[in-house]
């Protein structure tokens, strides 16, 4: 039995299909095997929308969710407040942390943000259960910026995608993991937020293609991508980078391979669209690897593949959903060293009170990541709207000034100002 209540938390909880509620409720005193913590930031993921859309039908959501609601959000960063005696030699109050939600504890799909009553990212205070520590999924985090920690999980998904790709040599069954270094790569539908993270990572990770082609059908997204991740920087890292709008192409496969001077060794697909998957398949070189990165919400999603090329050309397909702990640690290390910039993912900020509306409408809200600061109340706001809102709000005026210094990207100074403003 649990002991007496010590604190209240505010949290967004899932009760069933499209049933999210912002609740205030009491947390019990932690057991000796648990850790009590404060959440500072959480990044809303499309996976949370899928959990809300499916309710108890979701593979990670408990069948009794209506009677025992779960806290949503799995891309979060916070501070340890109190440590149960079992973990006192490993963790200390005051330490920052991030969570790897894919616990895989005893083969279970249970994960923070999907399956637990007392832990999730969209909360002010949480109780971290024993299995998180047992699976080494409570990761120390020492950056001064909270939102970097929230973005470590989505960036780890990109890192994992590249690590999952593989190639072979003729006559060998050994899979050489990773992309083909110095080869040709295409990222299709790649100017969205996760596509930008993929570009940033693969240019700066030390194992890069010689040629990288990014496609999209939206010229404004492509222009923004090129502004943030420019061709000159890629060239300095040994990568010939091209941004290509395929919307007006009569034969996309032909034109892309002509641009590349041949077929592509590695292709990543960032949109769950059959035509995009089929385009990726059609431009694969001998031993080419296609990574279907985009997770479809349609469980019956299908696309045609050229099985002749699978047989005679050794083309192959992989799919990844999330990263592992090593991928998160790599993401955090690259962020600390300034090799990648997670800010390129963020287009909106908000407070805990904006989580329900944002999550339930996520597919129709344009832009990239929606970053939530759980200790404040603030409507979801696009960074692009700061200037307009600043005409009547000193807070947004200052936030616009700070983000204007970084090409309209969220940054550490903006975060510090926002949290100090509300703390006052």
Image (tube, grey):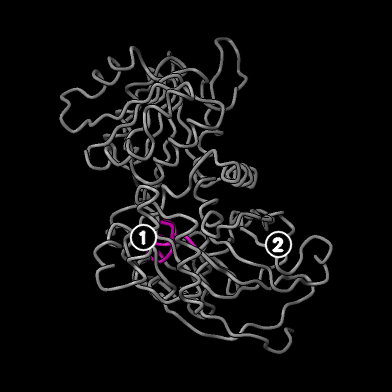
Q: Of callouts 1 and 2, which one flags the residue occurring earlier in the amino acid sequence? A: 2
Q: Bounds of the magenta span?
A: 42-54
Q: Residues within 10 Å of mark 2 (few under 14, many from 20)?
A: some
Question: Label 2: which residue?
Answer: 131
**Residue 348, which numbered label?**
1
Q: Position of residue 401 (x, y in %)?
A: 36, 59
Whether residues under marks 1 and 2 lie with C-beta atoms below 8 angstroms apart, the answer is: no
Identify the residue at image location x=39%, y=62%.
49
**Alpha carbon separation for disc pair 1 and 2:** 32 Å
Give 380 or 6, whichever is nearer the viewer.
380
* The magenta stretch spans residue 124: no
Q: Give coordinates of residue 354: x percent, y percent.
A: 38, 72
In reply to whether residue 49 is colored magenta, the answer given is yes
Residue 197 lies in quadrant: top left
Q: Say left or right for 239 vs 188.
A: right
Task: Kindly state the secondary structure of the residue where label 1 is placed.
Answer: strand
Magenta segment, prevailing SS (helix, strand or loop): helix
């Amino acid at each position: 039995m649990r002991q007496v209540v010590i604190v209240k938390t505010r949290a967004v909880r899932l009760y069933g299909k499209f049933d999210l509620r912002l609740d205030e409720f009491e947390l019990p005193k932690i057991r000796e095997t648990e850790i009590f913590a404060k959440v500072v930031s959480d990044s809303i993921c499309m996976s949370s929308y899928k959990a809300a859309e499916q309710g108890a039908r979701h593979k990670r959501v408990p069948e009794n969710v209506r009677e025992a609601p779960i806290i949503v959000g799995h891309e979060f960063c916070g501070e340890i407040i109190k440590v149960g005696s079992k973990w006192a030699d490993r963790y200390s109050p005051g330490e920052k942390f991030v969570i790897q939600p894919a616990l895989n504890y005893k083969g279970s799909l249970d994960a923070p943000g999907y399956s637990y009553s007392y832990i999730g990212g969209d909360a002010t205070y949480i109780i971290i259960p024993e299995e998180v520590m047992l699976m080494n999924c409570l990761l120390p985090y020492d950056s001064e910026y909270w939102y970097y920690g929230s973005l470590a999980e989505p960036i780890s998904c990109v890192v994992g995608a590249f690590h999952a790709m593989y190639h072979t040599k003729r006559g060998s069954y050994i899979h050489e993991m990773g992309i083909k270094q110095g080869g040709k790569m295409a990222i299709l539908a790649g100017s969205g937020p996760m596509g930008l993270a993929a570009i940033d990572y693969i240019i700066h990770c030390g194992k890069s293609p010689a040629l990288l082609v990014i496609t999209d059908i939206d010229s404004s997204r492509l222009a923004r991508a090129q502004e943030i991740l420019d061709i000159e920087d890629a060239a300095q890292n040994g990568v010939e980078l091209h941004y290509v709008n395929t919307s007006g192409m009569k034969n996309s496969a032909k034109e892309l391979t002509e641009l590349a001077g041949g077929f592509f060794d590695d292709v990543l697909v960032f949109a769950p669209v059959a035509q995009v998957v089929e385009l990726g398949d059609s431009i694969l070189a001998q031993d080419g690897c296609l990574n279907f990165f985009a997770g479809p919400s349609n469980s019956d999603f299908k696309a045609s593949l050229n099985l002749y090329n699978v047989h005679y050309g050794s083309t192959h397909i992989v799919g990844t959903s999330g990263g592992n702990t090593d991928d998160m640690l790599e993401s955090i290390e690259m962020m600390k060293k300034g090799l990648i910039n997670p800010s390129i993912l963020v287009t909106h900020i908000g407070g805990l009170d904006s989580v329900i509306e944002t999550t339930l409408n996520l597919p129709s809200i344009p832009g990239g990541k929606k970053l939530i600061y759980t200790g404040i109340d603030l409507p979801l706001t696009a960074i692009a709207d700061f200037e307009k809102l600043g005409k009547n709000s000193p807070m947004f005026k200052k936030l616009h000034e700070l983000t204007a210094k970084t090409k309209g990207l969220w940054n550490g100074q903006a975060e510090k100002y926002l949290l100090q403003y509300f703390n006052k």
